[in-house]
Amino acid sequence: MKVGVSSEKEEVRPSQFCGSILSKHSESRGDFTILLSNIVLGCKFVCSAVNKAGLAKLIGLAGETNVQGEEQKKLDVLSNEVFVKALVSSGRTCLLVSEEVEEAIFVPPSKHGKYIVVFDPLDGSSNIDCGVSIGTIFGIYMAKDKDNATLDDVLQPGNKMLAAGYCMYGSSCTFVISTGNGVNGFTLDPSLGEFILTHPNIKVPSKGKIYSVNEGNAKNWDEPTTKYVENCKFPQDGSSPKSLRYIGSMVADIHRTLLYGGMFMYPADLKSPNGKLRVLYEVFPMSYLMEQAGGQAFTGKERALDLVPSHIHDRSPVFLGSYDEIEHIKELYAACKSNGA
Ligand code: AHM
Ligand code: MG
């Protein structure tokens, strides 16, 4: 019997989806495949740690504060170490940016490779202790000169990313990736220890019946966000109200949005004019995936992937989801601008 969810499908691994990268770089020697294998290995390791977190006493605070001023959890610390080691030891990276580390990490020359990886090793950390889905998010850039990489190599718009993806540690472990040629999803078969292609060529529905936002911030929202959510609840066109779903783990909320359609947003508000989510390793990878799946990502001012970060830990408001939903929020921002609001 063939391995996979459908008996008609061959077993396909994430590294086999490197085709579009390899064809863009005819000099390719399999470096990207090796890099991706190490990322996947890191995900399997973190998945295993997440699954036994309660038993191994890996939940709770580690007693340190990260660069965002948030308390680090033990699993955050562990996940960061796992990915830094996996990426450095791949010998294919020269520069790393992690949510958990204040400064960019310059890889020692003996391990230099041409890729730059930006990542959030364990996103949704407020959900760890209650066993709700959490995940790893990553994006990959290419350095101009691997032996002289600088911060400028990483302070680039998201449209320069070569690939992006996430791994969700939920009721199953799901790895989703795009190398610029569509989006594919894989599910970890724990008995094999391998990711199997279960969601080929993911396309986000052009309309959606779900909106996803932390509504506790509503009193500080701007007018377009307020109007959008009001319209979700009290549509004026006779359509049914939308459902609200908010997990508070970006990976899980985006995964649902990719599969079911709708809108996920972390907008600006009066308290946080730049929103909460980090440009390089949260907004960009998810925006890349959403566009590759046929959806859109918008900041309230521009296409999210056109942003140019000026600092590695910059934040931005973001609206991600079905094509038509993002068109709607764009119209609301445009109307607000023309009214001078
Ligand atoms: P984290 O990197 O500290 O986990 O924060 C990011 C998370 C996202 O996964 C999620 O979308 C958001 O924070 C939830 O924030 P809030 O609790 O303000 O709704
Ligand atoms: Mg995060």
Image: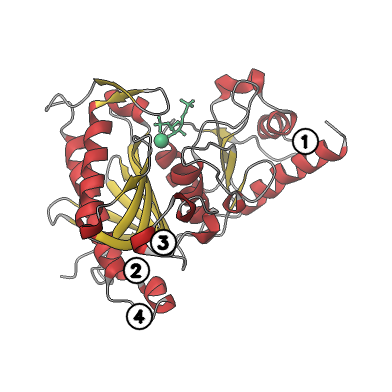
- Indicate which disc residue 300 carries: none
The quarter holding residue 102 reads top left
Residue where numbered disc 4 is placed: 27
The residue carrying pointer 1 sits among few (fewer than 14), some (14 to 19) or many (20 or more) residues within 10 Å by Cα, namely few
Q: Amino acid at mark 3?
A: Ala
CA–CA distance in space, label 1 to label 4? 56 Å
Task: Please name the residue that numbered disc 2 is placed on.
Answer: 17
Q: Secondary structure at mark 1?
A: loop
Disc 1 target residue:
236
Residues at badges 1 and 4 in contact (C-beta under 8 Å)? Answer: no
Distance from Cα at disc 2 to Cα at disc 3:
21 Å
Can residue 6 be seen from the camera position used here?
no
Mark 2 and mark 4 lie on one chain; the one further toward the N terminus is: 2
Which residue is drawn at the image coordinates 47% and 59% (left, top)?
161
Q: Looking at the image, is mark 1 or mark 4 earlier in the sequence?
A: 4
The residue type indicated by label 2 comes to Phe
Label 3 residue SS: loop
Taking 94 as reference, is 188 left or right? Answer: left
Label 2 to label 4: alpha-carbon separation: 17 Å
